[in-house]
Amino acid sequence: MLDYVNLEADLTEEERMVRDTARDFVEDRVKPDVGEHWIEGTFPKELITEMGELGFYAPNLDGYGLPNLSERAYGILMQELEAGDSGLRSMASVQGALVMYPIHSFGSEEQKEEYLWDLGSGEKVGCFGLTEPEHGSNPSAMETHAEADGDGYVLNGAKTWITNSPISDVALVWAKDRSDDDTVRGFLVDTDKAGVTTNKIDEKLSLRASITGEIHLNDVRVEESDVLPGVEGMKGPLSCLTQARFGIAWGAVGAARDCFETARQYATDREQFGGPIARFQLQQDKLAEMATQITLAQLLIYRLTDLKERGELRPEHVSMAKRNNVRMARDQSRIAREMIGGNGITADYSPMRHMTNLETVYTYEGTHDIHTLILGHDLTGFQAFQ
Ligand code: FAD
């Protein structure tokens, strides 16, 4: 596997173990039929509890049966999962960084006990409801709202493009509290409550091996104890997104690496004009560029991981890495596809599947444009969002 500057040398025993466990899991349990799932538009649901048993959900958190691994172990895990498929990494990212992380950081003790054990084991599935039909890049304009009602609230609104909503047991819904000056709060909504519907979005041409849906909330009654007590305002959802984007910046490198390895192998095996195509300078140029871009992306995310461990990582750092690494993976997956010729457009080879998946990864968790604006603001002091 491509590790051109020997980053492996710095890994601890535990981090190597996580990498090997995840790599074996992807080889044995994911790669054999992920192409089929992608074509069918299904997620391999049997893997949800298997990933829980292996400790793949929020392994960087502690307590409640969680492994409390290093941030680097967490990143390596995301990298290996996305080498399988971005849909698989999305499952682990949403469950771990977008549902378990906020409960762990901002939840009451009762909420932690009620949800973290079951989410960690995969017995329960969670989803994160921020995006709305009319509000994507600007979620602060959300219309979903809560009205105080006795010792609880009544929720109304609609969320869309929500990973796993149709198979979720609990949705973390971000809504404006009308009884408190429209302050944004997080509500833990069990999806079997009256007034909640979660229909699936079909006919996606990207991230097909991942279930995506809507959440409709029609006079849904929740209790005060269902509100995350430890956070209010957009800081709540945005801090979760920083966690998830960190994992995406790692994951994208995994998708690119899988494209590189597939193209390198193909170039070595495929013969044209009397020998392997890997002997042509044009093909070598593509591999050299791919290996270089992957290595640069690895170096960026390794450095940011050190900053995260030291508590010095800023959200803008994460924007730079999400923006760069996903663009890199998107570009390089296309080159890899090209190197496989006609066979490259089938599901027998991973690059085109990765390439179409990466269209989603480029768009969700802040589009490439939005991360450009975040960096522009940080670098100049002027915000160019509106
Ligand atoms: P828009 O915001 O309408 O943007 C359209 C275009 O305009 C983009 O190119 C954007 O970059 C550009 N643009 C917008 N504003 C500006 C500006 N100020 N300056 C310049 N250009 C701008 N959301 C969740 O809450 N939870 C999930 O689990 C989740 N999962 C997803 C899974 C999938 C498969 C997909 C596709 C999306 C998912 N999303 C999820 C939603 C995702 O986060 C949004 O699609 C994303 O934030 C972009 O919003 P939008 O699609 O409404 O695009």
Image: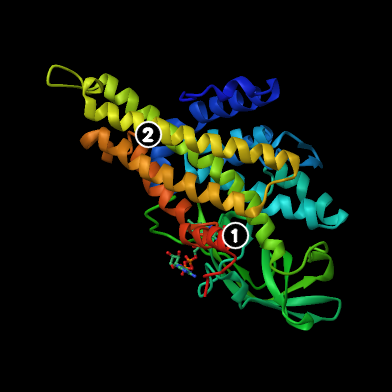
Which amino acid is tagged 2?
A: Met
Residue 323 image position (x, y, % from top left): 50, 51
- Neighbour class for label 1 at 10 Å: few (<14), some, many (≥20)? few
Residue 128 image position (x, y, % from top left): 63, 59
Whether residue 307 is visible: yes
Image quadrant of residue 281? top left
Query: Residue at the spot x=87%, y=54% of the render?
Result: 109
Residue 314 image position (x, y, % from top left): 67, 51
State the residue lying farthest toward the top: 275
**Disc 2 marks which residue?**
290
Instruction: Say which of 239 and 115 sits in front.
Output: 239
Distance Cα–Cα, label 2 vs label 1: 29 Å
SS category of the residue bearing label 2: helix
Query: Residue at the spot x=37%, y=40% of the render?
Result: 332
Does 330 sit above or below residue 306? below
Q: Earlier in the sequence, mark 2 or mark 1?
A: 2
State the residue lying farthest toward the left: 273
Marker disc for residue 378 = 1
Query: Residue at the spot x=75%, y=82% of the render?
Result: 181
